[in-house]
Image (cartoon, rainbow, N blue to C red):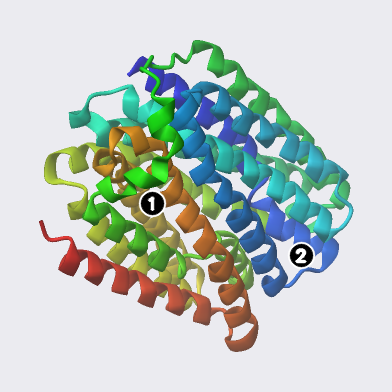
Amino acid sequence: MLNIFFLGLVSFFSDVSTYMVYPLIPLYLMATFGATPGLIGVIEGIAESLASLLKVFSGYISDRFQKKKSIAFIGYAAGALYKLALIFASTWPGILLARLVDRTGKGIRTAPRDVLISESINADNQGKAFGLHKAMDMLGAAVGILLTYFILNTIDAETTTSGEYKNLFMISVIPALMGLLMFFFIRQKKTQKQEKNREKFWKNLRKVDNQLRFYLFIVFLFTLGNSSNTFLLIKAKSVGFDDAQVILLYFLYNIIASLLAMPFGRLSDKIGRKSLLVPGYLCFSLCYLGFAFSADSKLLIVSFILYGIYTAMIIGVERAFVAELSPPQLKGTMLGLQSTLAGIALLPASVIAGLLWDSFGSAAPFLFGAILSFISAVLLIIFLRR
């Protein structure tokens, strides 16, 4: 568990850095560049989807060359460069370029990091391991958001200038560098190399469990309705919350996910992954209905709470599910493929959400997501019975 703890610290500091910035991006785009929800959807969709294409290749390279720690380090280092790119961006295409740097880093690091987690603990505790990592990950996000909230309150969120946003971006580089230092304490499990077998990994795809193949399809379908979290922040802003209050709502979501991620992961070790994936999708459907019909602050707060519960139920459990169903020689590839499929779907998901918002109002993208999530839950019940 010590290896998982230090991997968790890497993610903790990285997310402190990232989430000092992430909730500010849509606010910064609207305040400084006059961006609409549609344009923000395009920016987020392109950044998430194009960079996610790297995840499956990163996983494959990790499987073949067994340099998981080095590859993950490169991915996390890109997060520090992202903050510097934001500082020098003077137009919305510059913000898009910065987001591509950040998401490229995430695409590089996700699969090798997840394999390091999976290989650091026995098969009976995979859910616990991924749950612990996700708890530390989300805790870092919550701390980063809380820091931003206090800073925004200090400088008056209603009159935040472009220069003040950039000062926040500069401060966020510090925890990113602290996360990189944690790699000195991480140990990679030594495995016997089998380059010839891994070189033709596509020939081994027939060994992939049919349940895993179908679940990857469900991941893609579900993500078509799960657009970028920036739309949650824009929704909160449209209901009447100011910038600092929007940040605080996002903190609420992250701290709930952090507190519940490990308990749900351990529960999945006992009752099975699918027993949590189905209610997790249903919880998402319910919380998106809440976002759709939020006309006041109370319902919106409840929706953010439900979103935190959904995240805790799904995010670590689905990675444990993919890891345990993957052939050992394809574990990194399959974990990367799962993230890639979700990332590919996020481009049309965010574009669709932006267009629905601009054309039919703020309820439309959330209703669309709620419907697709419900369908995904039904498909899991019907086709993944055993």
Q: Quadrant of the N terminus?
A: top left
Circles 2 and 1: CB atoms closer than 8 Å: no
Q: Quadrant of residue 332?
A: top left
Circle 2 crowding by C-alpha within 10 Å: few under 14, some 14–19, many from 20: some
Q: Is residue 245 visible?
A: no
Q: Quadrant of residue 183?
A: top right
Q: Amino acid at mark 1?
A: Thr
The numbered mark at residue 30 is 2
Q: Quadrant of the C terminus?
A: bottom left
Depth check, front residue: 158 or 269:
269
Residue of label 1: 311
At 46% from the left and 71% from the top, the residue drawn is 291
- Residue 360 picture location, percent across and down: 58, 88
Alpha carbons under labels 2 and 1: distance apart: 27 Å
Where disc 1 sits, the SS reads helix
Q: In this view, which residue lies farthest toward the bottom?
A: 360
Question: As displayed, is residue 146 above or below residue 157?
Answer: above
Q: Amino acid at mark 2?
A: Met
Q: Earlier in the sequence, mark 2 or mark 1?
A: 2
